[in-house]
């Protein structure tokens, strides 16, 4: 028996702009399940497009598409290769907000504070320039692994995954150009997708979430530069988690609200409580789930000091001889730096190398750039991250698997290898790398991370 929508929630939404109780309830009763994905522009693939049944484009996101039906993503090797991310459509509106409030062609330092499992982070990464970087942070330790996995599959070298409490970012005062806070919330926006979540909802929890949202924002705001942009979002319908937080922000922290243009036929509702703009997504008006987003520009405060640049540890820079055998694995057309970290070689763009020491001294870094492998006796033992990153050399020897064998590879189970010449081989499915194997005379080792392997048959 499905749970009915909480009466207290419906009451609390009565006077909010755009709320139409009958239509809202009907959308929940009908329970349409909408599936949407966002293609990875750094891993273009015709075969993804022919495999997934793409329906229409999501109007507010360049690479976002609705699907005609929900496939088994687990059994699609393109999914494991990072060719797309399965993401709720409303939340992709972040792209429109970023494009209208930020000059994305400049070099930016961006923080995604509440990042796991990585939906917003992978979108942000696709939007920023190559000489920008993203710090993708998750405070809850058990959720950092899935975040790091999704970032790895996305294949970019300009992302740092951290595991810090919001208040730790005060060590990076006046540092970021953009901060995205996709806050933990009471989750009412997902009730249509997840009916069981209704039983956990209460007004008390909404109030607790609102207090926590304020605390998170108060903690992180000092690390935003004057003139920088803060983007706040939730998947709740409650005003105290949305417009009221926005009002509090503009009062307490000298922010100005940013107005976003969009086409009226998209069905998004603009709220302007206390002259602060917020954007609401109701499932009876748009093809997607409940969502709220608002953007703010931090006023110049005149007293902000720039963080003093900490120098790079020169000892960690790779030596000339190391560079020779390491760079063979890297696409010569990409501009990338290398350094040694805990016996591993990391590839990352220069802007991140320059900021490395600042980030290391302030944050707990789970992953930075691309860990391309370990350097042992003048040889690079390549890592899985290298296989799926976009800086890999196109000259690495590869083998191409059909669907059945690709799934066996991803399950860590046996399949027949036709090419038996010894050495490292990049395993490809259609035009996308899945991982490495090392072939010996009569067998091979599978280097796909065991903890990521497909468990079902
Ligand atoms: N941005 C993510 C995405 O698009 O995939 C979803 C983020 S989810 C709405 C909110 C995240 O905030 C969760 O990963 C949760 O673990 C994290 N979180 C929970 N409590 C937090 C706190 N006190 N401070 C910061 N983040 C918190």
Image: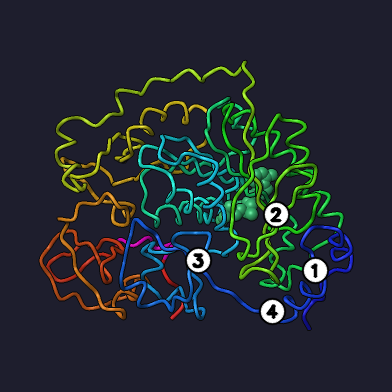
Callout in the foreground (3, 2): 2
Q: Position of residue 341 (x, y in %)?
A: 35, 35
Identify residue for label 3: 86
Ligand 1 lies under 8 Å from the Cβ of mark 4: no
Badge number at residue 270? 2
- Along the polypeptide, which appears first: circle 4 or circle 1? 1
Count neighbours of disc 4 (C-alpha within 10 A) and say few if under 14, some if 14 to 19, many if 20 or more. some
Q: Position of residue 303 (x, y in %)?
A: 62, 15
Q: Is residue 142 visible?
A: no
Q: Is mark 1 within 8 Å of ligand 1?
A: no
Mark 3 or mark 1: whose residue is earlier in sequence: 1
Q: Nearer the viewer, mark 3 or mark 1?
A: 1
Q: Point out the residue furthest to the bottom here.
A: 1
Q: What element does badge 4 sit on?
A: loop
Residue for badge 1: 20
Q: Residues within 10 Å of mark 3 (few under 14, many from 20)?
A: some
Image quadrant occupied by the C terminus: bottom left
Where does label 4 land, which residue? 31
| Residue 239 picture location, percent across and down | 80, 52
Determine the residue positioned at 37% across, 32% down.
Answer: 351
Ligand 1 is within 8 Å of the C-beta of the residue at disc 3:
no
Residue 88 appears in the figure: yes
Q: Are marks 3 and 2 in contact (CB under 8 Å)?
A: no
In the image, which residues are magenta? Answer: 447-452
Horizontal relation, residue 148 to residue 320: left or right: right
In the image, residue 136 sits, relative to residue 44, either above or below, namely above
Magenta span contains residue 295 = no
How far, Cα to Cα, is label 3 from label 2? 26 Å
Relative horizontal placement of residue 136, taking residue 49 as reference (left or right)? right
Element type at mark 2: strand
């Amino acid at each position: 028996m499905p749970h009915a929508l909480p009466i207290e929630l419906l009451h609390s939404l009565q006077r909010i702009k755009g709320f139409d109780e009958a239509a809202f309830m009907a959308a929940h009763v009908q329970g349409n399940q909408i599936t949407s994905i966002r293609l990875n522009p750094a891993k273009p693939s015709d075969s993804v497009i022919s495999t997934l049944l793409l329906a229409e484009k999501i109007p507010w996101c360049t690479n976002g598409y609705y699907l005609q039906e929900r496939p088994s993503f687990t059994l699609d090797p393109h999914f494991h290769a990072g060719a797309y991310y399965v993401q709720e459509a409303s939340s992709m509106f972040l792209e429109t907000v970023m494009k209208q409030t930020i000059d994305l062609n400049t070099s930016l330092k961006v923080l995604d504070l509440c990042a796991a499992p990585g939906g917003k982070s992978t979108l942000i990464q696709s939007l920023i320039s190559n000489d920008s970087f993203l710090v993708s942070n998750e405070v809850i330790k058990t959720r950092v692994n899935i975040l790091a996995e999704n970032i790895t599959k996305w294949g970019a070298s300009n992302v740092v995954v951290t595991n810090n409490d919001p208040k730790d970012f005060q060590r990076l005062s006046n540092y970021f150009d953009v901060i995205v806070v996709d806050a933990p919330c009471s989750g009412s926006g997902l009730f249509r997708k997840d009916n069981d979540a209704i039983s956990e909802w209460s007004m008390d929890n909404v109030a607790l979430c609102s207090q926590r949202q304020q605390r998170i924002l108060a903690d992180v705001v000092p690390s935003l530069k004057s003139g920088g942009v803060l983007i706040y979002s939730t998947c709740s319908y409650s005003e105290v988690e949305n417009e009221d937080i926005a009002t509090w922000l503009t009062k307490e922290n000298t922010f100005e609200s940013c107005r976003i243009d969009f086409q009226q036929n998209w069905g998004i509702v603009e709220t302007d409580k206390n002259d602060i703009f917020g954007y609401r997504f109701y499932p009876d008006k748009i093809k997607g789930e409940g969502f709220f987003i608002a953007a703010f520009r931090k006023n110049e405060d005149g007293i902000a000091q720039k963080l003093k640049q900490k120098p790079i540890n020169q000892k960690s820079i790779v030596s000339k001889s190391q560079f020779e055998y390491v760079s063979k694995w890297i696409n010569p057309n990409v501009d990338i730096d290398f350094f040694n970290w805990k016996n591993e070689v990391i590839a990352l763009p220069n802007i991140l190398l320059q900021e490395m020491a600042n980030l290391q001294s302030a944050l707990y870094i789970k992953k930075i750039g691309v860990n391309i492998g370990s350097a042992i006796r003048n040889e690079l033992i390549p890592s899985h991250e290298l296989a799926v990153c976009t800086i890999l050399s196109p000259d690495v020897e590869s083998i191409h698997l059909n669907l059945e064998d690709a799934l066996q590879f991803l399950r860590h189970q046996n399949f027949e290898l036709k090419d038996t010449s010894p050495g490292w081989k990049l395993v490809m499915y259609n035009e996308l790398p899945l991982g490495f194997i090392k072939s010996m005379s009569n067998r091979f080792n599978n280097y796909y991370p065991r903890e990521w392997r497909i468990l079902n048959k």
